[in-house]
Image (spheres, rainbow, N blue to C red):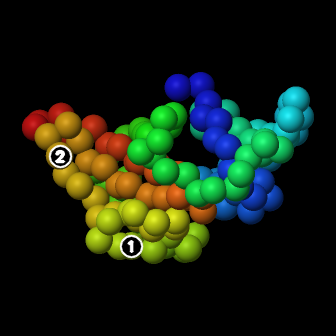
Amino acid sequence: MHHLALTVRDLDASVEWYGRAFGLTHRMDLPHPGGFAQMLSDDAWQLVIALHHHDSSSGEAFVESHTGLDHAGLAVPSRDDPLAWQSHLETQGVVRAERADRPLTQSPIADEPYGSVLVLRDPDNIQLELFAPPAADE
């Protein structure tokens, strides 16, 4: 994946949250017809997220059951990484819950045959998953 582009309700709040939660820095402004975006990345430019505001947006929260994005899955190297992310996300206001089904919540880590998954929601309710592959000996 080269980058992830998301439409958000409050561009400033989302830039601030994604910056803190994922250690990203604002790199450039991206004006476009009918709106504006800001590009964020880590120092190595391995994680790039463009956050968009469209003038025509009605401002509703994200719902994955509508046509379009269901969720975005981000790779982490091992099962230890989702554990570290859980604590880090809590410091960023993402509370642990039985299910990540509302803004700024995170699920318990699910260990599945295909890997370990930590589900979380951003301030706009966009579902993100941190995915660690199964251990090599499994």
Q: Residue at x 52, y 65 (%)?
A: 103
Q: Secondary structure at mark 2?
A: strand
Give percent across and percent down for residue 112. Answer: 17, 46
- Name the residue carrying label 1: 96
Give percent across and percent down for residue 7. Answer: 67, 43
Tell me: residue 35, above or below residue 110: above
One can see residue 28 in this view: no
Which residue is situated farthest in the left direction here?
138
One can see residue 18 in this view: yes
Q: Residue at x 38, y 63 (%)?
A: 100
Q: Amino acid at mark 2?
A: Glu
What number is the disc on residue 112?
Answer: 2
Q: Secondary structure at mark 1?
A: strand
Q: Amino acid at mark 1?
A: Arg
Q: Residue at x 70, y 55 (%)?
A: 59
Q: Residue at x 88, y 29 (%)?
A: 33
Q: Are marks 2 and 1 in contact (CB under 8 Å)?
A: no
Quadrant position of residue 12: bottom right
